[in-house]
Image (cartoon, rainbow, N blue to C red):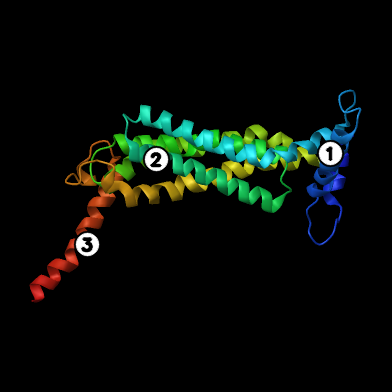
């Protein structure tokens, strides 16, 4: 079958460059150029299932970059409207989504050859990245208090759903991991798992760190500490209060010694 041929072709050693796609792409360009010079160019064409697949590589990378940019622009405009025209908050969300897509693209190309399947599922990652970023950014944007309070409130309200959604997504595609064709295991199951793993890491660690740095520029009430914000869960308010007491104790001891 075509998929078996595809996997066997990818496994072949084609020389020190390792650029397997260039073999077919160069042949397609040469065949099309020869056809353009032929007097029969209006009555004939070069066709085969293999050629149709690899002809995509003539424009795949260029269009993928264009679509990533279009997706980022759509994300920014949508977040801008839903976040009450908060430009900086929308920009942070869009940058976080784009970071996830770029990381998925890099990891996928390091583990497997770049092709239409990798490109398509990388673009799909732009849509899935919203689930790992927009909810947390929106919760942070609408929370009150200082940066610590807003982070605690946003984490408490969105992290459980983020983790549950990630687990359910992996479980939904898990049967593909046992499919007899390695093609589906590698390019369908593997790519979705990469998107989810990168999205979870960015949603749980990178985005909160980014918002903690930019928090003072994103509104809120710096004079309202975390232990006074009612929307923050009680156990988090208690932890913040204990940490603040522990921080003040050494300062008071040093003042008494002086």
Residue 119, image x, y percentages: 66, 39
What whole-number distance in Å separates the C-alpha atoms at marks 2 and 3? 35 Å
What whole-number distance in Å separates the C-alpha atoms at marks 2 and 1? 45 Å
Q: Which mark is residue 228?
A: none
Residue at the location (74% across, 40% down)?
Answer: 57
Q: Which residue is mark 2?
A: 91
* Whether residue 86 is visible: yes
203 or 31, which is in the foreground?
31
Q: Which residue is mark 1?
A: 33
Residue 175, image x, y percentages: 72, 34
Residue 109, image x, y percentages: 68, 50
Please name which of the two marks, 3 or 1, marks the residue nearer to the observer: 1
First in sequence: mark 2 vs mark 1: 1
Q: Which residue sits furthest top? A: 43
Residue 90, image x, y percentages: 38, 37
* SS type, badge 2: helix
Residue 167 placement, left or right of 92: right
Mark 1 crowd level (few <14, some 14–19, many ≥20, 10 Å Cα): few
Q: Which residue is mark 3?
A: 247
155 relative to 255, above or below: above
Mark 2 crowd level (few <14, some 14–19, many ≥20, 10 Å Cα): some
Question: Is label 2 in contact with label 1 (beta carbons under 8 Å)?
Answer: no
Residue 63 placement, left or right of 24: left
């Amino acid at each position: 079958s075509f998929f078996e041929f595809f996997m066997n072709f990818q496994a072949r050693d084609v020389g020190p460059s390792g650029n397997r796609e260039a073999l077919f792409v160069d042949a397609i360009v040469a065949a099309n150029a020869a056809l353009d010079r032929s007097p029969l160019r209006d009555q004939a064409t070069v066709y085969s299932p293999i050629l149709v697949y690899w002809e995509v590589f003539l424009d795949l990378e260029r269009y993928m970059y264009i679509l990533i940019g279009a997706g980022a622009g759509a994300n920014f405009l949508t977040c801008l409207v839903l976040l009450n025209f908060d430009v900086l908050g929308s920009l942070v969300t869009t940058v976080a989504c784009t970071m996830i897509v770029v990381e998925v693209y890099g990891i996928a190309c390091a583990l497997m050859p770049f092709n239409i399947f990798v490109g398509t599922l990388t673009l799909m990652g732009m849509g899935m990245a919203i689930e790992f970023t927009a909810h947390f950014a929106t919760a942070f944007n609408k929370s009150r208090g200082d940066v610590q309070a807003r982070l605690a409130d946003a984490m408490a309200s969105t992290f459980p759903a983020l983790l549950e959604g990630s687990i359910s997504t992996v479980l939904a595609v898990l049967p593909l991991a046992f499919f007899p064709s390695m093609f589906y295991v590698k390019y369908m199951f593997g790519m979705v798992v990469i998107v989810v793993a990168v999205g979870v890491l960015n949603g749980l660690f990178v985005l909160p760190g980014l918002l903690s740095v930019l928090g003072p520029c994103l509104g809120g009430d710096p004079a309202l500490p975390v232990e006074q914000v009612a929307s923050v869960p009680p156990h988090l308010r208690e932890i913040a209060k204990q940490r603040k007491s522990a921080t003040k104790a050494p300062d008071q001891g040093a003042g008494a010694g002086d």
